[in-house]
Amino acid sequence: MSDTDQNITGFDLWYLSLPVVSARDHGIGRVDGACEVVVLRLTSEGGETGWGEASPWVVFTGSPEATYAALDRYIRPLVLGRKVGDREKIMLDADRAVAHCTEAKAALDTALLDLAGHISKQPIHQLLGGKCRDAIPLSVSLANPDFSQDRALLDRLREDDVRIVKLKTGFRDHAFDVMRLETLAQDYPEFAVRVDYNQGLDPEEALARVRDVATFRPDFIEQPVRAPLYDLMAQIREAIDVPLLADESVFGPEDMSRALREGICDGVSIKLMKSGGFARAQSVATMAARHGLGAYGGDMFEAGIAHLAGTHLIAATQAIDLGCEFYQARYYLAEDILETPFPCDGGHVQVPDVPGLGIQPDLDKLNHYCISQGRAA
Ligand SMILES: [Mg+2]
């Protein structure tokens, strides 16, 4: 069979622990040692496969254990036996079957699209309505508590023609943030700099610190305070003359609607792991663009499958116009899980033009890093 009337007959999971090359600090927490992701493989009755990745972060979106259980226990039964082409109905059923768990739903949506792409021999961006860009500027985040290691990374990025960095701030004192911004301005002037607090500032200190950082004229300053503090976000936005971005405050279209109503941001970070699927992510982007806001493709602690999903999303979504942050596969994981390297060249992610996601995961690597596995009966 060659069409998407095929039934889905396989639903396999790998819970992976992927070693990372260094510690990273963020306003809401530290990542060290390894990050944990869940990989899903769907198989059709014709033997085609589709892959998806769920990349939760426990202090941001949710836990890998909850993600695994959502897929294994609650989503698996409503997928097996369904038609590959029933993606929209399957996603609606997944939303009703388990609350939240947006990373699990992102993995499911990705795997359904990858499977449909392999069967119809089209790239995912084609299934989403067509490609509006061939390459996406890459931003790499600097979050190492040892700044000398980030300087070594900056030297490597310079060699690789990466020209956007995002400084993670607010996990130590203000002087540490200012020192790093001064170093970037003096020693790395070719880099565009973005600043992200990941909610790290106390409300009473936030305005003064953000105002001071704004004097460095970064491209934007992101999410200085906790996600629910919409009033404070709006106050800070009024008080500075560089764009304020929302990340943790905006997961899906419902949040975007409120963010627009309350004027909390000039732009938004869009992530499949927050939105829980492509349609909702594209909806956030469209809403932002309609109100003159910018959007970039953010990520969690992801491996290459999730990066590829985000790449196709941005390729097919004109409104996501501030680049992407799909750097972990190349610059943070000790080893990625794809068969061939995540496509990145000249400081840009290159959009694949082959069926599905474009690259499959390497089964040996999945099995090597797997700490728990679930298979269809
Ligand atoms: Mg962020």
Image (tube, helix red, strand yellow):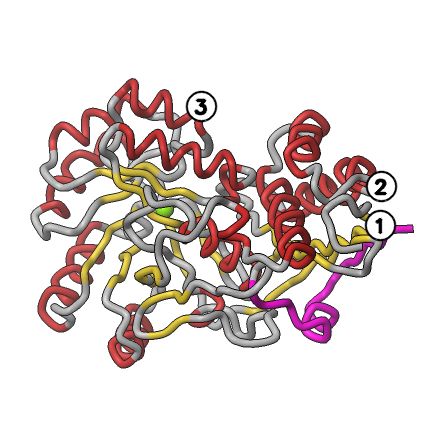
Residue 292's x, y, as percent? Answer: 22, 33
Residue at the image position 35 percent from the left and 63 percent from the top = 135
**Residue positioned 29% across, 34% down in the render:** 289
Q: Which residues are magenta?
A: 358-377
Of the two numbered discs 2 and 1 on the same chain, state the one appearing first in sequence.
Answer: 1
Q: Is residue 141 visible?
A: no
Q: Is residue 297 left or right of residue 209?
A: right
Q: Is residue 214 shown to the viewer in this render?
A: yes
Pick out the residue farthest to the top: 261
- Tell me the distance, in whole angstroms, between the alpha carbons under discs 3 and 2: 32 Å
The residue to which callout 2 is attached is 81
Which residue sits at x=46%, y=31%? 252
Which residue does the numbered mark 3 point to in the structure image?
A: 254
Q: Amino acid at mark 2?
A: Gly
Q: Please, is residue 60 above or below residue 26 in the view? A: above
Disc 3 or 2, which lies upstream in sequence?
Answer: 2
Q: Is residue 374 above or below residue 318?
A: below
How many numbered marks are there? 3
- First in residue order: circle 1 vs circle 3: 1
Name which residue type carries label 1. Answer: Thr
Secondary-structure class at tag 1: strand
User: Is residue 361 one of those drawn in magenta?
Assistant: yes
Name the amino acid type tagged 3. Answer: Glu
Counting from the top left corner in percent of width and height, residue 18 is at 60, 66
Tell me whether the residue at label 3 lies in contact with that at label 2, contact meaning CB atoms closer than 8 angstroms. no
Query: Could you say which is closer to the camera, residue 157 or residue 253?
Result: 253
Q: Which residue is mark 1?
A: 9
